[in-house]
Image (cartoon, rainbow, N blue to C red):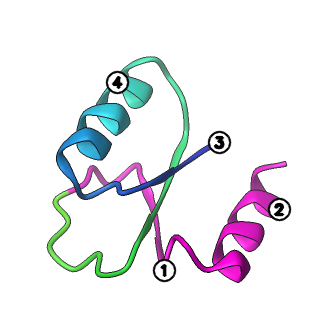
């Protein structure tokens, strides 16, 4: 599992697409995922990517 911040931005979207095409599982952190338009296979986490608590909890699950 790979965690991406800035997933709804231009670079984030391209990065996610490339990771999915390569067969990776992707988790995206977004402040406002409503209308993100990300693929259903991407696990969305609502939160501020710069908040340590969000980052730690996402990484803990990724192993």
Which portion, as a residue range, is magenta? Answer: 38-63
Query: Within 10 angstroms of label 4, few (less than 14), some, or many (20 or more) residues?
Result: few
The relative height of residue 39 versus residue 11 in the rendered view (above or below) is below
Residue 35 in the figure: left or right of residue 28: left
| Camera-side mark, 1 or 3 | 1
Quick one: label 4 or label 1, which is nearer the N terminus? 4
Quarter-of-image position of residue 33: bottom left
Query: Within 10 angstroms of label 3, few (less than 14), some, or many (20 or more) residues?
Result: some
Residue 34 in the image: x percent, y percent?
Answer: 21, 80
Query: Within 10 angstroms of label 2, few (less than 14), some, or many (20 or more) residues?
Result: few
Q: Residue furthest top?
A: 22
Element class at badge 3? loop
Quarter-of-image position of residue 25: top right
Q: CA distance from mark 2 to mark 3?
A: 11 Å
Residue 25 in the figure: left or right of residue 54: left
Residue 20 in the image: x percent, y percent?
Answer: 40, 30
Q: Which mark is residue 18?
A: 4
Residue 55 in the figure: left or right of residue 32: right
Q: Which mark is residue 1?
A: 3
Quick one: label 2 or label 3, which is nearer the N terminus? 3
Is there a contact, CB below 8 Å, between mark 1 and mark 3? no
> Pointer 1: what residue?
48
Quick one: label 3 or label 4, which is nearer the N terminus? 3
Query: Within 10 angstroms of label 1, few (less than 14), some, or many (20 or more) residues?
Result: some
> Pointer 2: what residue?
60
The relative height of residue 9 versus residue 23 in the rendered view (above or below) is below
The relative height of residue 44 versus residue 19 in the rendered view (above or below) is below
Front one among 50 and 25: 50
The answer to whether residue 52 is magenta is: yes
Residue 47 in the image: x percent, y percent?
Answer: 49, 82
Q: Quadrant of the N terminus?
A: top right
The residue positioned 25% from the left and 43% from the top of the image is 13
């Amino acid at each position: 599992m790979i965690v991406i911040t800035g997933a709804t931005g231009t670079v984030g979207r391209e990065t996610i697409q490339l990771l999915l095409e390569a067969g990776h599982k992707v988790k995206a952190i977004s402040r406002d995922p409503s209308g993100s338009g990300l693929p259903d296979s991407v696990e969305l986490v609502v939160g501020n990517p710069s908040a340590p608590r969000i980052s730690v909890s996402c990484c803990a699950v990724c192993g």
